[in-house]
Image (cartoon, helix red, strand yellow):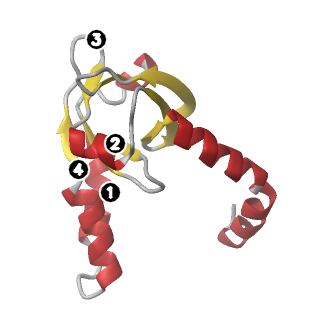
Amino acid sequence: MFIGEYNHNLDSKGRLAIPAKFRVSLKKGAVVTKGLDNCLFLYSKEQWQKMAEKLASLPTSQAKARAFARHMIAGAMDLEFDSQGRITLPEYLRDFADLDKKTIIAGLYNHLEIWDEGAWNKYKKQAEKNSNDIAESLGDLGV
């Protein structure tokens, strides 16, 4: 399970250290892809397989389903860790998420999100401001 929020720096070669506590769950490999809200999603190979199967089962007759599957699957890349526990994020994904140097790695149960620090702080501030309304609307979903 991935939980918590961690500050890490992206180096000039696009390498990002993943917190050691998460590397255990990612030791069999990882997949990074374009996420939502202009962040990246990082999955273990096992969780990515589950997600990819769900995406592949979406109805190809629906334009939004096709678009979302393309967004997630075509934007994905397999990752390997170096000896220092770093991954290398490809340029097209760094550009997508507007990643500069300072990043946030946020644990969201079955995957990680990688954010530009400024974008994360702005998003978090807005979400916290609206947390009561968000919680109320999720009541209909059983949360």
Query: How many residues crowd around disc 1 within 10 Å: few (fewer than 14), some, or many (20 or more)?
Result: some
| Distance in Å between CA atoms under marks 4 and 3 | 23 Å
Camera-side residue of 24 and 9: 9
* Image height of 27 relative to 118, above or below: above
Q: Going from the N terminus, do you reach mark 2 or mark 1 first?
A: 2
Classed neighbour count for the residue bearing mark 3: other residues with Cα under 10 Å, few (<14), some (14–19), many (≥20): few
Q: Name the residue located 39 percent from the left edge and 53 percent from the top edge.
A: 35
| Mark 4 or 1, nearer chain start | 1
Front one among 102 and 124? 102
Disc on the earlier residue, 2 or 4 = 2
Which residue is denoted by mark 3 in the rendering? Answer: 84
Q: Are the residues tagged 2 and 1 within 8 Å (C-beta)?
A: yes
Q: Residue furthest top?
A: 84
Task: Kindly identify the amino acid type of the residue bearing the numbered disc 1.
Answer: Met
Give the labeled residue for mark 4: 76
Residue located at (18% from left, 40% from top)? 78
